[in-house]
Image (cartoon, rainbow, N blue to C red):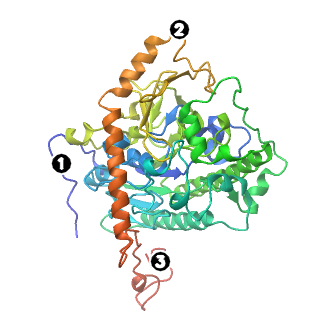
Amino acid sequence: MTRPAPTTVEGDRVTPPGSRPNILLLMADQLSAFGTGPYGNTDVLTPNLDDLAARGTVLSHAYCNAPLCVPSRAALMTGRLPSDVPSNDNAEEFPTSVPTFAHTLRRAGYRTILAGKMHFVGPDQLHGFEERLTTDIFPPDLTWTRPWEEQGDPPRLSGAQQNGGREYLDILRSSGTLPWTYQMHYDEEVRFAALQRLRELSLATDDRADEPWLMVASFTQPHDPYVAPPEYWNRYEGRPIALPEPPPTDVPPHPLDVWVNSYHGVDRGTVTDETTYLARRGYYAMTSYIDDVVGSFMSELERFGVLDNTVVVFTSDHGDQLGEHGMYFKRTMREWSVRVPLIMAGPGVAAGHRVRTPVSLVDLHPTLADLAGARPPEWVSDHFAGTSLAAAVRERSEVVAGHPGVVIENSAEGTLRPVRAVVRDHHKLVYARDLPDQLYDLRADPQELTNLAEEQGHDEVRLRLRERALTGWDPELAEKEMVASQRMRTYLGEALRHGRHTSWAYEPRVDAAHRWIRSTDDDPWDPLCGF
């Protein structure tokens, strides 16, 4: 059967199929940019990421749009801020009717394939992907709704909100090595499935063989717990691992920092240097595993002769504090929590280049559309909170012309009201209603030790960034809507726990009866046998 060419409607531009690259998006989970070699960390071993950076472009100041999995990934997929999806915490449904970059590229004639974690919440576990090779690792339902009204002030993860009875401080203190981990088990399944599909696509001779493909392979490491098998843990035996500078003792912590440390239980006990070292060692060990994964994909692209026609993008959904500023895990607007790696390499991407403009994950939808030669109609692109980075990575520009600035949101657990941060040039403002502003000069003060919000001479930049934070956003209304959503989801979750349970978890489909050698017509010398 001959398939029709991609549909073109007014406002769309589709580049001829033969000139369009494949796109491989590799994702880590909870990987801070500061935990990788291309971003200056000399303690961690990431040779494959270093190589990818050398043959491509590093976005030096890339941010997530939420310091938590579900809202960050929804923003990445849609190009919208989490509040506009809406997808604000780890248990708010991602609406089926919101377009993603998978829809955009699929409509332009791409095969769209997903393997691994995307943490979609709701019965739609595809969101534009034609194929999904594995199930997800975390709940797709309303299980993780954690209402602000039940957390207290300061917020605590306790009681029914806990998972497995463990608090975060317990997780931190359990860092170390194990023969195998559930995260390795999951990630190896994802790697195997994605590499197998990549090989099949490279060898395909069917009527869709000429179609370009988009593959997202998303892994769960180096997400906590900070535990790794010996073959990765031992890579750091005898290697120096720098510990974070202790937070200043002469400045009272900001309420947002108090809230996050309370939620994670870090304030309930002493976190020793040894505990921090073990957590960092486990985190770096898992990061080295992710680096090996990147290497395996690059090797297979090269083996099958498609490396030169594939744009490879590497990123993460958010970061991890790892003790910086006396904080651990995520859920904060501090730099280690919100800065992510974003590296691109392949046809049309400048090699050995760095883009200095602060960018964020909402820029990926318009960027991938540009790289694929597809232009979404205005009723899709008008919702974009970012802009395409394609020109900057093609033209070796250090600046993304016309970039609107970075907006980061946090309306999830660990806070008691919606928070917004804005990053422009080298300044960052953190805003929450009825709390003191935080303003940092990230160039002069990368550790965010000096809050300039109340100091003379900084009113102009503070007010300008605050105006940007409040543009199109009412923090009081956002708080009311978030509380109402939490209440409703709690009610629905309680209802769905009664009676027969129908899972929203994705179930991969495998037609084993028609794979491998099943008759005398199957030729075992054919590399496509069994596909």
Q: Residues within 10 Å of mark 2 (few under 14, many from 20)?
A: few
According to the picture, the residue beneath numbered tag 2 turns out to be: 456
Marks 1 and 3 in Cβ contact (< 8 Å): no
Q: Residues within 10 Å of mark 3 (few under 14, many from 20)?
A: few
Residue 139: mark? none
Q: 103 or 80, which is in the foreground?
A: 80
Residue ID at (35%, 57%): 489
- Mark positioned earlier in the residue sequence (2 or 3): 2
- Check the image and report above or below for 66 versus 160: above
In the rendering, at what x and y percent does residue 123 appear?
A: 33, 64
User: In what element is the residue under mark 2?
Assistant: loop
Question: Quick one: which residue is furthest to the right in this view?
Answer: 238
Asked if residue 348 can be seen in this view, the reply is no
Residue ID at (36%, 46%): 483
Quote the CA–CA distance across marks 1 and 2.
Answer: 55 Å
User: In what element is the residue under mark 1?
Assistant: loop
In the rendering, at what x and y percent does residue 402 appear?
A: 36, 24
Quote the CA–CA distance across marks 1 and 3.
Answer: 37 Å
- Mark positioned earlier in the residue sequence (1 or 2): 1
Question: Quick one: which residue is furthest to the top in this view?
Answer: 457
Asked if residue 445 can be seen in this view, the reply is yes
Q: Which quadrant does the N terminus fall into?
A: bottom left
Say what amino acid the circle numbered 3 marks. Answer: Asp
Residue 8: mark? 1
Marks 2 and 3 in Cβ contact (< 8 Å): no
| In this picture, residue 445 sits left or right of residue 419 | right
Q: Which quadrant does the C terminus fall into?
A: bottom left
Say what amino acid the circle numbered 2 marks. Answer: Gln
